């Protein structure tokens, strides 16, 4: 069964390149640019992996992750992708419950490899 | 707490006079044993007895009862709190070693000022909303460019319309990156030119000297340096004022030895030849260099000179940069500057043409000379100076500034120098290796 990825990112050009890479790797890819809609989209689509930016309009990636982990439903794997790559940001993300923390700019091959590992490929 | 130190101060005053307890006690109408108790702060003293002791010790009674300024005690108590020093011994330390106590307090205050300045700079980087937003935008631009370029360079079977779209993304993100970098550069330039307090006393001094362009008409007219310091809003700390005071005192000394009008007239007559001027006025090379560098001002159309004077440790004592030759404020300068090589052959001037990474050419006249005359008992300290002349000024100075055949490739500092293959490089560059500098 094809695994799905939801990209929550407000930079359309980054979304376009990630979509290309992940579709080419065999994933079904959707995206959302508005942080305030992230949780409802996750609930509706039930993706296997969420690629989550931190600096989003209306709601930060940390808050989205926190609210997501507080839900008792089936949890997607979360790869946090952020320009705020300091150690304290990674620690905060790990404390909240992120699965993978990556800094921007990223290597294409590494993002794809990390998503694959999150779904057990 | 200061009152408990009366006995300690009495003891110190007695010792300074070389008097015994027996002598002082007898002169003041006390027993030696009672004076001993007083000196060890086990008995108090006041009124007539205190005045009698003060008379014998030939000091004002107030100097025994009034301790040092509260600020000094407070500063040293802070030092004791933050270290393993005995907090309770601060008062005694101040009483016994007032000069050392003052020096330690001054160092502690300076350390705190520097930490605060560092905090301001760090805070600016971490919390300035414009900086944070701009840096985030830059990283996003770079991410999009890197990822898209990576796809184009590694994937062969991209549909043509997709390929065109990716190329367009690179174009658009590159333009946004360029705009963000330009805005960031302009912002940092404005921040450095702002009237806000300088981060360090040295930066405050630089601003003060830049505003005056190293020329002080008032000092040339004989005004005191204290008066010159009255018009110094940039000097916003005691440390900055101290640094400026040293520079201005030296300037005033030079102005007295080489009065402006005769010096200017002589300089014009010899095409600003420092060697001729040195012989004519009997001055040191460094004095002549300083006067030449400060000649140009409103009403005086002299050539542009830059000047750097350092001591043997490489510390800058006089910094007048040129737009074409930036002098680093922090960290080490380029080791290839002839300035540093001058120390190995003191009193021998050398002329070099410096080839800067951006293509500018600067003439550099360097010399090291002793600060004071040598004596049999002491090795003199040396200072080295590098008088800088932009290439455009050379023709007017040709009589004594020939065009050497060789040029020396130098930089400003290793950290920001693009000459990555330089054999004299002593540190990593902040700048990534990009296009080569001018051949």
Image (cartoon, coloured by chain):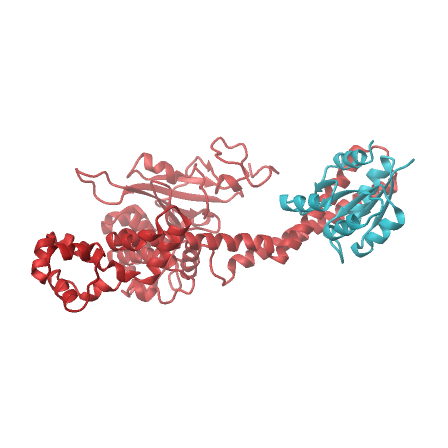
Chain colours: A cyan, B red
| Viewer can see residue B81 | yes
Q: Quadrant of residue B217?
A: bottom left
Residue B429's spot in the image, x, y percent?
54, 38
Q: Nearer the viewer, residue A24 or B363?
A: A24
Q: Is residue A44 left or right of residue B91?
A: right
Left or right: B78, with A111 as reference point: left
| Residue B13: quarter of image | bottom left
Work out whether B177 lies above or below B312: below
Q: How many labels, in total?
A: 0
What is the x, y in percent for residue B368?
A: 31, 41
Depth check: give the residue in front, A28 or A105. Answer: A28
Kindly tell me whether residue A104 is visible in this rendering: no
Say left or right for B433 vs B96. Answer: right
State the image coordinates of residue B383 (x, y, percent, origin top left).
Answer: 31, 43
Give residue B6's quadrant in the image.
bottom left
Residue at horizontal 12 percent and vertical 53 percent from the top? B21
Q: Quadrant of the C terminus of chain A?
A: top right
| Residue at the extreme bottom of the image, as rendered | B47
Is B379 situated above or below B255? above
Residue ID at (7%, 60%):
B27
- Front-most of residues B378 and B208: B378
Residue situated in front as seen by the camera: B347 or B312: B312
Q: Measuring 82% from the left and 48% from the top, which residue is drawn there? A: A72
Residue A1 pos. (x, y %):
92, 35
Q: Is residue A117 above or below residue A50?
A: above
């Amino acid at each position: 069964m094809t695994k799905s990825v939801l990209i929550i990112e407000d930079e359309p050009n980054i979304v376009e390149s990630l979509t290309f890479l992940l579709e080419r790797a065999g994933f079904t890819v959707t995206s959302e640019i508005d942080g305030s809609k992230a949780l409802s989209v996750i609930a509706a689509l039930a993706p296997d992996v969420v690629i989550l930016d931190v600096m989003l309009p209306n709601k930060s990636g940390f808050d989205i992750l926190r609210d997501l982990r507080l839900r008792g439903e089936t949890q997607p794997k979360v790869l946090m992708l952020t320009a705020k790559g300091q150690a304290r940001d990674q620690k905060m993300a790990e404390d909240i419950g992120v699965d993978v923390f990556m800094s921007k700019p990223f290597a294409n091959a590494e993002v794809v490899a990390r998503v694959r590992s999150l779904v057990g490929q | 707490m200061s009152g408990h130190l009366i006995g300690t101060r009495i003891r110190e005053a007695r010792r300074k006079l070389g008097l015994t307890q027996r002598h002082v006690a007898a002169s003041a109408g006390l027993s030696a044993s009672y004076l001993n108790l007083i000196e060890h702060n086990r008995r108090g003293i006041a009124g007539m007895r205190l005045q009698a002791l003060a008379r014998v010790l030939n000091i004002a009674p107030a100097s025994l009862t009034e301790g040092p300024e509260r600020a000094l005690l407070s500063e040293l108590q802070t030092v004791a709190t933050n270290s393993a020093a005995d907090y309770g011994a601060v008062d005694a330390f101040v009483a016994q070693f007032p000069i050392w106590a003052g020096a330690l307090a001054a160092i502690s205050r300076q350390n705190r000022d520097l930490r605060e300045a560092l905090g301001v700079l760090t805070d600016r980087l971490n919390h300035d909303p414009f900086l944070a937003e701009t840096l985030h935008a830059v990283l996003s631009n770079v991410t999009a460019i890197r990822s898209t370029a990576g796809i184009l360079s590694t994937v062969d079977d991209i549909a043509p319309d997709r390929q065109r779209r990716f190329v367009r993304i690179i174009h658009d993100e590159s333009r946004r990156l360029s705009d963000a970098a330009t805005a960031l550069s302009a912002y940092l330039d404005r921040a450095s030119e702002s009237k806000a307090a300088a981060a360090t006393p040295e930066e405050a001094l630089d601003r003060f000297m830049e505003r005056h362009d190293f020329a002080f008409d008032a000092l040339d007219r004989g005004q005191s340096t204290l008066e010159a310091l009255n018009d110094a809003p940039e000097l916003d700390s005691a440390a900055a004022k101290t640094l400026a005071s040293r520079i201005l005192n030296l300037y005033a000394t030079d102005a007295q030895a080489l009065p402006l009008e005769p010096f200017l007239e002589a300089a014009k007559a010899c095409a600003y030849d420092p060697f001729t001027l040195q012989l004519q006025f009997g001055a040191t090379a460094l004095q002549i260099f300083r006067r030449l560098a400060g000649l140009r001002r409103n009403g005086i159309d002299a050539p542009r000179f830059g000047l750097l004077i350092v001591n043997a440790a490489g510390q800058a004592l006089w910094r007048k940069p040129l737009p074409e030759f930036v002098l680093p404020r922090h960290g080490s300068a380029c080791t290839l500057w002839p300035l540093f090589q001058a120390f190995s052959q003191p009193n021998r001037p050398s002329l070099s043409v410096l080839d800067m990474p951006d293509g500018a050419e600067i003439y550099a006249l360097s010399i090291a000379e002793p600060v004071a005359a040598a004596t049999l008992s002491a090795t003199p300290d040396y200072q080295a100076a590098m008088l800088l002349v932009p290439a455009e000024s050379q023709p007017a100075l040709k009589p004594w500034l020939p065009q050497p055949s060789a040029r020396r490739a130098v930089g400003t500092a290793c950290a920001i120098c693009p000459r990555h293959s330089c054999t004299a490089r002593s540190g990593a560059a902040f700048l990534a290796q990009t296009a080569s500098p001018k051949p």
